[in-house]
Amino acid sequence: MSNVIRVRAGLLRETHPGERRVALTPDDVRRLCARMSIRFERSCGIGAGHADDAYIAAGAEPAEFAQMASSSDVFVSVRRPAATRIFPATAVLIFLGSNAAPVTGLPAGQRPLHLDIARLSGMQGVKGADISSRQAAITGHAAILEAARQFGISHPMLMVDGSFVRPVRMAALGSDAASLQALATARRLGALTHGFGLERDTQAKIERLGAKFLGMSADLARLRQELCDPLSKMQLITTNVVIPGQTAPMLLDETMLSRLSPGTVIVDLAAESGGNCALMRVDETINVFGVRIIGSATLASHEAAEASRHFSDGLRNLLEHLIDADCSLRLDPRDSMTAALMNEETTLRRVSP
């Protein structure tokens, strides 16, 4: 195998407000530098606890974005880069975009190739395919800890004068990785947990976590009717029902919100997709009808170091899968994982000098 390093990668600094994760940690940069050159934007890892010196020691080189954009083939980041960042049409961008709608406005041949890691969700036996689910699980865990802070308690099973404080009643709407982790974390903290989902195997998933199954319905009007009474008895609710590429369905309208117990905390994990709650505001916490609605889109950043470690591990596995023995990044639609990443793209592309 040739010793010439052919793939030139750029590690981007996240620009979304409040985003502290980084796509690659120094440990994984060190392992990848054996087959690719890596440049990084200064301070890209600070939020996750990684100093620039650690990246330099791992074999990466600091660079300004303009310099990277003109001399790199592949760019990696946690989130989709901001639209204000201009990349050459030959570039390949790898990020976790929650299966966001495809970029439009330019013909496919005149824009960078966007490889959204979220498109790998559900694939079996492929290293790196679990990045999305791992980040979702961390988000669900962080959601419960944030809700506990909103309640002003550190533990639902807190003992005062020899007696336990009444446990919080919690419900998760959704059966994805974030919702299931939210149920698991809440139960470990002593909450009485309940779950509601739309998929056929929802009940088994929820009950395996020791939660009470509230039911399931694919009809939104019926769903709201079924949920109204049980949710009025909850103190904590998480919601995360999303449809890839579409606006999230409205699960809690204003009428339902008005019937919740004052002091209830809702964490809307579907905030970036439009939210499952009426009146929700992205990246804000609001108070309506005495109910607090948390619309944070950066909950995983509350656990930035751990979230980055998992993201980086999966991304390294993904890059190693995509890099040929001759150190070229080969995007072959005949490979199932590559086909999923490229979505509707069908052109074979190789990145090499």
Image: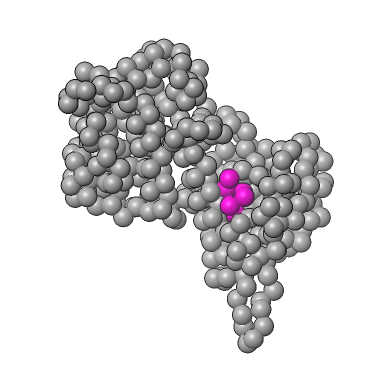
Picture coordinates of residue 211, whole percent (x, y): 71, 56
Question: Where, quadrant-wise, is the C terminus in this rendering?
Answer: top left
* Depth check, front residue: 62 or 24: 24
Residue at x 49% of width, y 22% of height: 336
State whether residue 123 is above or below residue 156.
above
* Depth check, front residue: 181 or 47: 181
Residue at x 65% of width, y 41% of height: 241
State whether residue 202 is above or below residue 122.
below
Q: Main secondary structure of the magenta part?
A: helix
Picture coordinates of residue 124, whole percent (x, y): 54, 33
State whether residue 78 is above or below residue 75.
below
Picture coordinates of residue 40, whole percent (x, y): 24, 39
Q: Which residues are magenta?
A: 177-182
- Quadrant of the rendered structure where residue 58 is? top left
- Quadrant of the rendered structure where residue 94 is? top left
- Quadrant of the rendered structure where residue 182 is? bottom right
Magenta segment: does it hold 140? no
